[in-house]
Image (cartoon, helix red, strand yellow):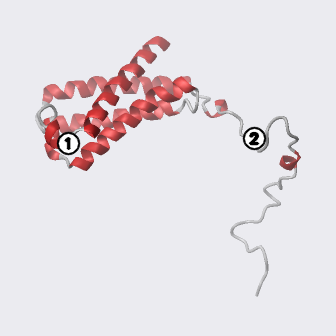
Amino acid sequence: MNGLSRAARLLLAGVFSGAGGVKLGFPKDRLRASMPWVEGFSQGTVRLIGALEILGATGVVGPRATGVLPWLTALASAGLAMIMIGGFATHVRRGEFLRSTSDVVLFVLAVFVARGRMRGDRSAVSSWPAVRACPPSASCSALSETPSMSQRPSPFRPIHDDP
């Protein structure tokens, strides 16, 4: 199952980084031949969709590959699934039913990755590296001197009783 998830993540990353790069790199007039749906959107919106696709593609493979915040993979693939819902709605509204099949396939892949990452990363918060106020080799006496919550002043109560 892990190999299937990895293949799905790589496929999503390849498709969305390519599609997002094209949307970011070319003007709307040049995209009309291969993507007729851009007529209904402004240049800025098309570029925003492209940027979100590239961010999603990076988020699908980057966190798992680096081991940094791996739970972001689930959020990125859920975001790509939402982009595909919007793409499907746009294609159906325009009567482009054959183009909408790719949206469905990519949606299913994105949901598969998101669900798998959410199940596999159930303890994602506990896998974060511990944040320390001082390096491990130094003495951390300052940490033990930190006032407890009951000793800290309340943000809702004035510290000084000035008339």
Residue marked by disc 1: 27
Q: What's the mark number on residue 128?
A: none
Where, by quadrant of the figure, is residue 124 drawn?
top right
**Depth check, front residue: 36 or 43:** 43
**Depth check, front residue: 72 or 93:** 72
Q: Position of residue 8 (x, y in %)?
A: 39, 19
- Circle 2 Cα neighbour tier, 10 Å, few/some/many (<14 / 14–19 / ≥20): few
Q: Is residue 20 left or right of residue 150?
A: left
Query: Looking at numbered disc 2 in the image, what kind of residue is underneath it?
Result: Arg
Q: Is residue 150 left or right of residue 107?
A: right
Query: Tag 2, which secondary structure?
Result: loop
Q: Where does the C terminus fall, quadrant-wise? A: bottom right
Query: Looking at numbered disc 1 in the image, what kind of residue is underneath it?
Result: Pro
Query: Tag 1, which secondary structure?
Result: loop
Where, by quadrant of the figure, is residue 89 drawn?
top left
Q: Residue at x 39, y 30 (%)?
A: 57
Q: Position of residue 138 (x, y in %)?
A: 85, 39
**Does residue 12 lie above or below 37 as drawn?**
above
Q: Position of residue 97 (x, y in %)?
A: 14, 28
Mark earlier in primary sequence (1, 2): 1
Q: Residue at x 77, y 65 (%)?
A: 153
| Inter-mark Cα distance, 1 to 2 | 48 Å
**Does residue 105 lie above or below 133 as drawn?**
above
Q: Position of residue 123 (x, y in %)?
A: 62, 29
Where, by quadrant of the figure, is residue 76 drawn?
top left
Residue marked by disc 2: 132
Q: Is residue 156 visible?
A: yes
Question: Between tags 1 and 2, which lies in front?
Answer: 1
Q: Is residue 131 left or right of residue 43?
A: right
